[in-house]
Amino acid sequence: MKKILLSVLTVLCIQANMSAQAQLTTKKVKIEDFTEKVTKVVLSGNIFYDSSIQEAVRENWTVSPYEFCSLEDFRQLKTNPDYYFLIKVKGQFRRESEPGIEFLSLVKGGQGAEKGIDGMLDLITFPYAAADSPTGRETVFLPLILDIIQQHVLSSIATDFVAYSSLIAYSNNIDEIKGKQLVMAEEDLSDEVTPVLRERYLGAPVIVADTDSADEYVSGNAANTVVSYIVCPENPQPGSFCYKMLIDVGTGDLYYFRKHRITRKVGPGFLVEDVKRIADVID
């Protein structure tokens, strides 16, 4: 009887030990030191971008210590697990002939980094701008993007559910736009959203404005206001992707995040299916 009991206890101890080891491998656990470690903000060498990211980080980055570094510093330090890195990267999808979009990626240094960004632990990779011809809107939205990145990481530290979730999960927050002022930049709308459909689905109280007017709500941190933002290549080709977002410009909350593939029939911008979903919430 004692032998049986000892065997059972041994098995239970082994299972408990394996369970503890499995827990240690979760993403949530791997990044729980984020707020204590230094985040290295990697400068690209592009004066315009570097000045924008430096200013935005100084004014908006609050969740961890940070330092600015060069690309060469990143190459030398990327295998060090004591650092996290916020770096701008270009993304090229399988059907694209060249990279069409730039992303802001937050990654952790350590094992696997010698293989490049793809070998590093990714906390969040967020669409930022067209790769070679940014419109300027990305600079206006940069503080909000940094807010979203920080909120996402803090939520990922709290639960593995967020840590392993796609950004598309933020579309579940769309009900939060109800009761807020919604501003859609006219250039963010797909060509398939005709004037008739725009009137049907995006009439008052929605404001459809030119890009400059829409961006004034962003730069002014307008309270209780949600503004559209899209990221796609300057000259989208079949196979490219378009990312569509609705962001609360007062709080930095992401209420809608979807993407679709560009085809010969479907161009960039919020599609009819997007505006219908938005209209269902507003009505």
Image (tube, helix red, strand yellow):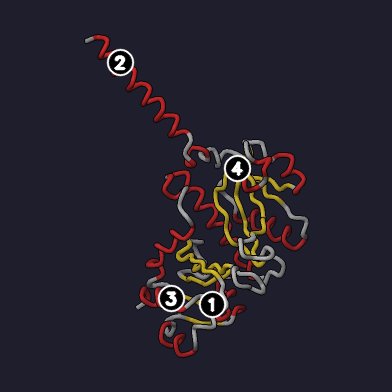
**Numbered disc 3: secondary structure:** helix
Q: Distance between the residues labelled 4 and 2?
A: 41 Å
Q: CA gap, disc 1 to disc 3?
A: 12 Å
Q: Name the residue under label 1.
A: 266
| x, y percent for residue 135 | 67, 72
Give the residue pinned by disc 2. 7
Give, as a three-letter code, the residue at label 3. Glu
Identify which residue, 64 or 197, lies in the foreground.
197
**For this view, does 96 lie left or right of residue 263?**
right
N-term-proximal mark, 4 vs 3: 4
Which is in the foreground here, disc 4 or disc 2? 2
User: Which quadrant: the N terminus?
Assistant: top left
Query: Position of 282 compared to 147: left or right?
Result: left
The residue positioned 41% from the left and 27% from the top of the image is: 18
Height in image: 10 above or below 272?
A: above
Relative to residue 190, is residue 256 depicted above or below? above
SS state under label 1:
loop
- Are the residues at dot 2 and dot 3 in contact (C-beta closer than 8 Å)? no
